[in-house]
Image (tube, rainbow, N blue to C red):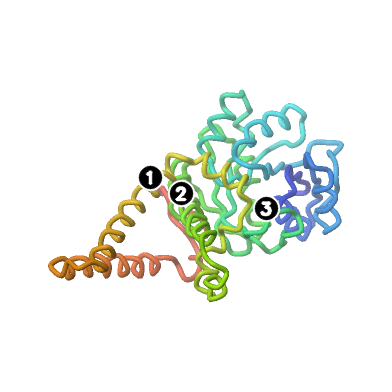
Amino acid sequence: MRSAAVVGTGLIGTSIALALRGRGVTTYLLDRDPQAARTAAGLGAGLVGVPRTPVDLAVLAVPPQHVAAALHEHQRAGLAEDFTDAASVKAKPQAEAAALGCDLSRYVGGHPMAGREQSGPLAAQGDLFQGRPWVLTPAPAAGPRAVGRATELAELCGARPVVMGHDQHDRAVALISHAPHMVASLLAARLLHGDESELHLAGQGLRDATRIAAGDAELWTDIVGSNAGAVAEVLAEVALDLRTVVDALRDLGSDTPQRYATSRAHLTQALARGVQGRGRIPARAPGALRLSGVAAG
Protein backbone atom coordinates (compact mmCIF):
# COMPACT_ATOMS: atom_id res chain seq x y z
CA MET A 1 0.00 0.00 0.00
CA ARG A 2 1.48 3.33 -1.11
CA SER A 3 -1.38 5.73 -0.47
CA ALA A 4 -4.46 5.99 1.74
CA ALA A 5 -7.18 8.42 2.76
CA VAL A 6 -8.71 8.65 6.20
CA VAL A 7 -12.23 10.06 6.35
CA GLY A 8 -12.88 11.26 9.90
CA THR A 9 -10.00 12.56 11.99
CA GLY A 10 -11.15 11.73 15.49
CA LEU A 11 -9.30 9.46 17.89
CA ILE A 12 -9.45 6.34 15.72
CA GLY A 13 -9.00 7.96 12.32
CA THR A 14 -6.05 10.06 13.41
CA SER A 15 -4.43 7.10 15.16
CA ILE A 16 -4.75 5.08 11.94
CA ALA A 17 -3.28 7.94 9.92
CA LEU A 18 -0.36 8.34 12.34
CA ALA A 19 0.39 4.61 12.09
CA LEU A 20 0.28 4.70 8.28
CA ARG A 21 2.52 7.76 8.09
CA GLY A 22 4.94 5.98 10.38
CA ARG A 23 5.14 3.19 7.80
CA GLY A 24 5.75 5.57 4.90
CA VAL A 25 2.24 5.53 3.43
CA THR A 26 1.14 8.82 1.84
CA THR A 27 -2.03 9.64 3.75
CA TYR A 28 -4.74 12.22 3.07
CA LEU A 29 -7.07 13.54 5.76
CA LEU A 30 -10.72 14.43 5.21
CA ASP A 31 -13.21 15.62 7.81
CA ARG A 32 -16.44 17.61 7.78
CA ASP A 33 -14.78 19.70 10.50
CA PRO A 34 -11.78 21.33 8.75
CA GLN A 35 -10.21 22.22 12.08
CA ALA A 36 -10.13 18.57 13.14
CA ALA A 37 -8.31 17.63 9.92
CA ARG A 38 -5.84 20.48 10.37
CA THR A 39 -5.22 19.43 13.96
CA ALA A 40 -4.51 15.86 12.83
CA ALA A 41 -2.18 17.14 10.12
CA GLY A 42 -0.37 19.24 12.70
CA LEU A 43 0.35 16.03 14.61
CA GLY A 44 1.99 14.56 11.50
CA ALA A 45 -0.95 12.36 10.49
CA GLY A 46 -0.96 13.36 6.82
CA LEU A 47 -2.05 15.92 4.24
CA VAL A 48 -5.36 17.76 4.47
CA GLY A 49 -7.56 17.49 1.40
CA VAL A 50 -8.69 15.23 -1.41
CA PRO A 51 -5.94 13.50 -3.42
CA ARG A 52 -5.62 14.28 -7.13
CA THR A 53 -5.89 10.63 -8.09
CA PRO A 54 -7.59 7.70 -6.30
CA VAL A 55 -5.59 6.32 -3.38
CA ASP A 56 -5.15 2.61 -2.79
CA LEU A 57 -7.45 2.44 0.24
CA ALA A 58 -9.84 4.81 2.00
CA VAL A 59 -10.62 4.25 5.68
CA LEU A 60 -14.02 5.51 6.80
CA ALA A 61 -13.43 6.38 10.45
CA VAL A 62 -16.95 7.67 11.05
CA PRO A 63 -19.75 6.57 13.43
CA PRO A 64 -21.75 3.48 12.39
CA GLN A 65 -24.80 5.43 11.22
CA HIS A 66 -22.68 7.40 8.73
CA VAL A 67 -20.64 4.54 7.21
CA ALA A 68 -22.97 3.67 4.34
CA ALA A 69 -23.56 7.27 3.29
CA ALA A 70 -19.84 8.02 3.44
CA LEU A 71 -19.03 4.91 1.40
CA HIS A 72 -21.62 5.86 -1.22
CA GLU A 73 -20.37 9.47 -1.39
CA HIS A 74 -16.68 8.69 -1.67
CA GLN A 75 -17.07 5.77 -4.07
CA ARG A 76 -19.01 8.04 -6.43
CA ALA A 77 -16.33 10.73 -6.06
CA GLY A 78 -13.55 8.24 -6.86
CA LEU A 79 -11.61 8.81 -3.66
CA ALA A 80 -10.04 5.34 -3.58
CA GLU A 81 -9.79 2.05 -5.38
CA ASP A 82 -10.88 0.12 -2.28
CA PHE A 83 -12.62 1.00 0.99
CA THR A 84 -12.86 -0.17 4.56
CA ASP A 85 -14.24 1.34 7.76
CA ALA A 86 -13.42 1.39 11.47
CA ALA A 87 -16.92 1.39 12.96
CA SER A 88 -17.72 -0.82 15.95
CA VAL A 89 -20.94 -2.19 14.40
CA LYS A 90 -20.86 -4.20 11.19
CA ALA A 91 -24.20 -5.76 10.16
CA LYS A 92 -26.28 -2.58 9.91
CA PRO A 93 -23.75 -0.50 7.90
CA GLN A 94 -23.24 -3.42 5.51
CA ALA A 95 -26.99 -3.73 4.88
CA GLU A 96 -27.35 0.02 4.45
CA ALA A 97 -24.45 0.11 1.99
CA ALA A 98 -26.09 -2.62 -0.07
CA ALA A 99 -29.40 -0.73 -0.05
CA LEU A 100 -27.65 2.42 -1.33
CA GLY A 101 -26.14 0.49 -4.22
CA CYS A 102 -22.52 0.77 -3.11
CA ASP A 103 -19.93 -1.35 -4.90
CA LEU A 104 -19.46 -4.05 -2.26
CA SER A 105 -16.69 -5.74 -4.25
CA ARG A 106 -14.45 -2.83 -3.22
CA TYR A 107 -15.49 -2.65 0.43
CA VAL A 108 -14.51 -4.66 3.51
CA GLY A 109 -15.91 -3.90 6.93
CA GLY A 110 -13.32 -3.42 9.65
CA HIS A 111 -13.12 -2.74 13.36
CA PRO A 112 -9.85 -2.13 15.22
CA MET A 113 -10.39 -3.39 18.77
CA ALA A 114 -8.72 -0.54 20.60
CA GLY A 115 -9.68 2.87 21.87
CA ARG A 116 -9.55 5.35 24.72
CA GLU A 117 -12.14 7.17 26.78
CA GLN A 118 -10.85 10.45 25.33
CA SER A 119 -11.97 11.60 21.90
CA GLY A 120 -10.68 13.84 19.12
CA PRO A 121 -7.41 13.97 17.19
CA LEU A 122 -5.37 15.23 20.15
CA ALA A 123 -6.07 11.92 21.93
CA ALA A 124 -4.67 9.89 19.01
CA GLN A 125 -1.69 7.56 19.32
CA GLY A 126 0.27 6.00 16.48
CA ASP A 127 0.71 2.78 18.47
CA LEU A 128 -2.91 2.54 19.64
CA PHE A 129 -3.52 -0.70 17.72
CA GLN A 130 -0.20 -2.42 18.44
CA GLY A 131 -0.84 -6.11 19.15
CA ARG A 132 -4.62 -5.61 19.22
CA PRO A 133 -7.17 -7.62 17.22
CA TRP A 134 -8.51 -5.89 14.10
CA VAL A 135 -11.72 -7.54 12.96
CA LEU A 136 -12.43 -7.80 9.23
CA THR A 137 -15.90 -8.77 8.03
CA PRO A 138 -15.66 -9.30 4.27
CA ALA A 139 -19.00 -10.00 2.60
CA PRO A 140 -19.18 -12.68 -0.12
CA ALA A 141 -19.07 -9.92 -2.75
CA ALA A 142 -15.78 -8.47 -1.48
CA GLY A 143 -12.97 -8.82 -3.99
CA PRO A 144 -9.56 -10.27 -3.11
CA ARG A 145 -7.78 -6.95 -3.69
CA ALA A 146 -10.06 -5.16 -1.20
CA VAL A 147 -9.63 -7.94 1.36
CA GLY A 148 -5.88 -7.88 0.88
CA ARG A 149 -5.64 -4.14 1.35
CA ALA A 150 -7.87 -4.13 4.44
CA THR A 151 -5.68 -6.88 5.88
CA GLU A 152 -2.53 -4.93 5.04
CA LEU A 153 -3.99 -1.86 6.75
CA ALA A 154 -4.40 -3.77 10.00
CA GLU A 155 -0.87 -5.13 9.77
CA LEU A 156 0.64 -1.72 8.99
CA CYS A 157 -1.05 -0.42 12.15
CA GLY A 158 0.58 -3.23 14.16
CA ALA A 159 -2.69 -5.10 14.72
CA ARG A 160 -3.66 -8.76 14.23
CA PRO A 161 -6.32 -9.29 11.53
CA VAL A 162 -9.24 -11.47 12.66
CA VAL A 163 -11.93 -12.57 10.19
CA MET A 164 -15.52 -12.81 11.45
CA GLY A 165 -19.06 -12.65 10.13
CA HIS A 166 -21.01 -9.43 10.55
CA ASP A 167 -23.55 -10.82 13.03
CA GLN A 168 -20.92 -12.76 14.96
CA HIS A 169 -18.88 -9.59 15.37
CA ASP A 170 -21.88 -7.61 16.59
CA ARG A 171 -22.79 -10.24 19.17
CA ALA A 172 -19.19 -10.32 20.38
CA VAL A 173 -18.82 -6.57 20.82
CA ALA A 174 -22.21 -6.39 22.54
CA LEU A 175 -20.81 -8.74 25.19
CA ILE A 176 -17.28 -7.38 25.56
CA SER A 177 -17.72 -3.66 24.83
CA HIS A 178 -21.17 -2.17 24.30
CA ALA A 179 -23.03 -3.70 27.26
CA PRO A 180 -20.06 -3.09 29.64
CA HIS A 181 -20.07 0.55 28.56
CA MET A 182 -23.76 0.87 29.40
CA VAL A 183 -23.26 -0.82 32.79
CA ALA A 184 -20.32 1.48 33.59
CA SER A 185 -22.39 4.50 32.57
CA LEU A 186 -25.36 3.47 34.72
CA LEU A 187 -23.06 2.87 37.68
CA ALA A 188 -21.33 6.22 37.18
CA ALA A 189 -24.72 7.96 36.95
CA ARG A 190 -25.51 6.77 40.49
CA LEU A 191 -22.69 9.04 41.68
CA LEU A 192 -24.82 12.05 40.79
CA HIS A 193 -26.83 11.22 43.91
CA GLY A 194 -23.82 11.03 46.24
CA ASP A 195 -22.74 13.71 48.69
CA GLU A 196 -19.39 15.38 48.15
CA SER A 197 -18.20 13.91 51.43
CA GLU A 198 -18.98 10.42 50.11
CA LEU A 199 -17.32 10.97 46.74
CA HIS A 200 -14.10 12.10 48.40
CA LEU A 201 -13.75 8.55 49.70
CA ALA A 202 -13.65 7.08 46.17
CA GLY A 203 -10.63 4.94 45.36
CA GLN A 204 -9.05 3.34 42.33
CA GLY A 205 -11.61 0.54 42.23
CA LEU A 206 -14.44 2.94 41.44
CA ARG A 207 -12.29 4.79 38.90
CA ASP A 208 -11.48 1.50 37.15
CA ALA A 209 -15.13 0.39 37.13
CA THR A 210 -16.36 3.67 35.64
CA ARG A 211 -13.43 4.74 33.44
CA ILE A 212 -15.12 4.00 30.11
CA ALA A 213 -18.21 5.94 31.18
CA ALA A 214 -16.24 9.10 30.31
CA GLY A 215 -16.68 8.37 26.58
CA ASP A 216 -18.59 10.76 24.31
CA ALA A 217 -22.32 10.30 25.01
CA GLU A 218 -23.52 11.13 21.48
CA LEU A 219 -21.02 8.79 19.85
CA TRP A 220 -21.93 5.96 22.21
CA THR A 221 -25.64 6.54 21.62
CA ASP A 222 -24.94 5.91 17.93
CA ILE A 223 -22.77 2.85 18.63
CA VAL A 224 -25.12 1.16 21.09
CA GLY A 225 -28.21 2.15 19.12
CA SER A 226 -26.75 0.66 15.93
CA ASN A 227 -26.26 -2.66 17.75
CA ALA A 228 -29.42 -2.38 19.82
CA GLY A 229 -30.72 -5.95 19.59
CA ALA A 230 -27.50 -7.67 20.61
CA VAL A 231 -26.84 -5.17 23.42
CA ALA A 232 -30.38 -5.53 24.74
CA GLU A 233 -29.97 -9.32 24.96
CA VAL A 234 -26.84 -9.01 27.10
CA LEU A 235 -28.31 -6.32 29.34
CA ALA A 236 -31.52 -8.33 29.82
CA GLU A 237 -29.43 -11.19 31.22
CA VAL A 238 -27.52 -8.76 33.44
CA ALA A 239 -30.84 -7.40 34.68
CA LEU A 240 -31.98 -10.91 35.68
CA ASP A 241 -28.74 -11.49 37.58
CA LEU A 242 -29.06 -8.08 39.22
CA ARG A 243 -32.61 -8.85 40.34
CA THR A 244 -31.40 -12.05 42.01
CA VAL A 245 -28.68 -10.12 43.85
CA VAL A 246 -31.07 -7.36 44.92
CA ASP A 247 -33.53 -9.90 46.31
CA ALA A 248 -30.74 -11.70 48.15
CA LEU A 249 -29.43 -8.48 49.69
CA ARG A 250 -32.88 -7.43 50.83
CA ASP A 251 -33.37 -10.81 52.47
CA LEU A 252 -29.99 -10.54 54.19
CA GLY A 253 -30.88 -7.10 55.46
CA SER A 254 -34.27 -8.14 56.85
CA ASP A 255 -35.41 -10.18 59.82
CA THR A 256 -36.03 -13.37 57.84
CA PRO A 257 -33.48 -15.88 59.20
CA GLN A 258 -35.15 -18.75 57.35
CA ARG A 259 -33.95 -17.28 54.03
CA TYR A 260 -30.49 -16.26 55.23
CA ALA A 261 -28.63 -19.35 54.01
CA THR A 262 -30.27 -19.32 50.57
CA SER A 263 -29.77 -15.60 50.04
CA ARG A 264 -26.15 -15.77 51.15
CA ALA A 265 -25.56 -18.65 48.72
CA HIS A 266 -27.06 -16.58 45.86
CA LEU A 267 -24.80 -13.65 46.70
CA THR A 268 -21.70 -15.85 46.93
CA GLN A 269 -22.58 -17.53 43.63
CA ALA A 270 -22.93 -14.16 41.87
CA LEU A 271 -19.53 -13.02 43.14
CA ALA A 272 -17.88 -16.34 42.32
CA ARG A 273 -19.24 -16.30 38.78
CA GLY A 274 -17.77 -12.83 38.42
CA VAL A 275 -14.36 -14.15 39.43
CA GLN A 276 -14.71 -17.01 36.94
CA GLY A 277 -15.87 -14.74 34.12
CA ARG A 278 -13.05 -12.28 34.59
CA GLY A 279 -10.62 -15.18 34.58
CA ARG A 280 -11.67 -15.94 31.01
CA ILE A 281 -10.31 -12.63 29.71
CA PRO A 282 -7.00 -13.46 28.01
CA ALA A 283 -4.03 -12.09 29.93
CA ARG A 284 -2.36 -11.37 26.62
CA ALA A 285 -3.43 -11.54 23.01
CA PRO A 286 -2.96 -15.00 21.46
CA GLY A 287 -0.78 -15.36 18.42
CA ALA A 288 -3.67 -16.57 16.30
CA LEU A 289 -7.42 -16.79 16.58
CA ARG A 290 -9.81 -19.22 14.93
CA LEU A 291 -13.28 -17.86 14.44
CA SER A 292 -16.03 -19.32 12.29
CA GLY A 293 -13.54 -21.85 10.97
CA VAL A 294 -11.24 -19.14 9.60
CA ALA A 295 -7.73 -18.85 11.00
CA ALA A 296 -6.42 -15.34 11.50
CA GLY A 297 -3.01 -14.44 12.79
Q: Secondary structure at mark 2?
A: helix
Tag 1 residue: 233
Disc number lying in front (1 or 3) = 1
User: CA–CA distance between discs 1 and 3?
Assistant: 27 Å
Residue at image location 45% in from the left, 67% down from the top? 282
Instruction: Relative to 173, say whether 225 is above or below.
Output: above
Q: CA distance from mark 3 to mark 2?
A: 19 Å
Q: Which residue in the structure is indicated by mark 2?
A: 174
Q: Residue furthest left?
A: 258
> First in sequence: mark 3 or mark 2?
3
**Residue 279 position (above or below residue 231):** below
The mark nearer the N terminus, 1 or 3, is 3
Disc 2 from disc 1: Cα separation: 9 Å
Secondary structure at badge 1 equals: helix
Q: Residues within 10 Å of mark 1 (few under 14, many from 20)?
A: some
Residue drawn at 41 percent across, 44 percent down: 232
Residue at x 54% of width, y 67% of height: 195
Query: Which image quarter: residue 44?
Result: bottom right
Dot 3: element: helix
Q: Is residue 181 left or right of residue 270?
A: right
- Mark found first going from the N terminus, 2 or 1: 2
Q: Residue at the location (51% across, 69% down)?
A: 206
Q: Which mark is residue 12?
A: 3
- The answer to the question of whether label 2 and label 1 lie on touching residues, with beta carbons closer than 8 A, is yes
